[in-house]
Amino acid sequence: MHPKSPKWLQDIADACALIRRATQDQTLAAYEQDAVIRSAVERNFEIIGEALNRIRRTDPATAARVPEHDDIIAFRNLLIHGYDVIDHARVWQVIENDLPRLQEQVQKLLNEIDSAP
């Protein structure tokens, strides 16, 4: 594993946790109306995608252990470059359906690092 991969994985875990905390007890309608929460969520998805992109470039074997890393990086690019056409319902769907799985995958990798001799 690349020496920086654990730090990038922790960045992803932290961003996942922040997104989940910011959106707990929210509805899609409330999310769509709250520009501050949307900005925080989008920024943290950008961090997730950038961290995975760095891992993919420097540590492809670790990136491959996050099955949808290419899709996550593409989502990051959409948020940054397509800021004016973001589909908030799609972002909400990612939060509800994909983020918990990503958080679990990354935590598993971090646990493996922590338990390595």
Image (tube, rainbow, N blue to C red):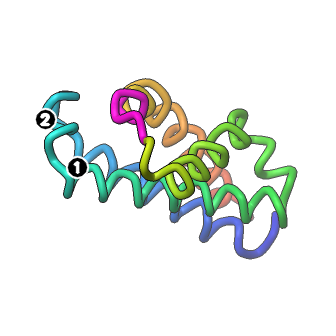
Q: Is residue 70 visible?
A: yes
How far apart are the alpha carbons under marks 1 and 2? 12 Å
Above or below — where is 32 with respect to 27? below
- Is 34 magenta? The answer is no
Residue 27 sits in quarter: top left
Secondary element at image label 1: helix
Residue 24's x, y, as percent? 20, 38
Residue 53 sits in quarter: bottom right
Secondary element at image label 2: helix
Disc tally is: 2
| Quarter in which the C terminus is drawn | bottom right
Above or below — where is 104 with respect to 5? above
Q: Which residue is mark 2?
A: 30
Is 79 placed left or right of 62 in the picture? Answer: left
Which residue is at 49% across, 30% downward?
98
Q: Which residues are magenta?
A: 86-92
Is 61 placed left or right of 77 in the picture? Answer: right
Residue count near mark 2 (Cα–Cα under 10 Å), binned few <14, some 14–19, many ≥20: few
Is 15 placed left or right of 9 in the picture? Answer: left
Any mark on residue 3, and which? Answer: none
Q: Seen from this angle, which residue lies furthest front?
A: 84
Q: Which residue is mark 1?
A: 22
Q: Is residue 25 visible?
A: no
Which residue is at 70% across, 66% downward?
5
Check disc 1 and give the amino acid type. Answer: Ala
- Is 91 magenta? The answer is yes
Residue count near mark 1 (Cα–Cα under 10 Å), binned few <14, some 14–19, many ≥20: some
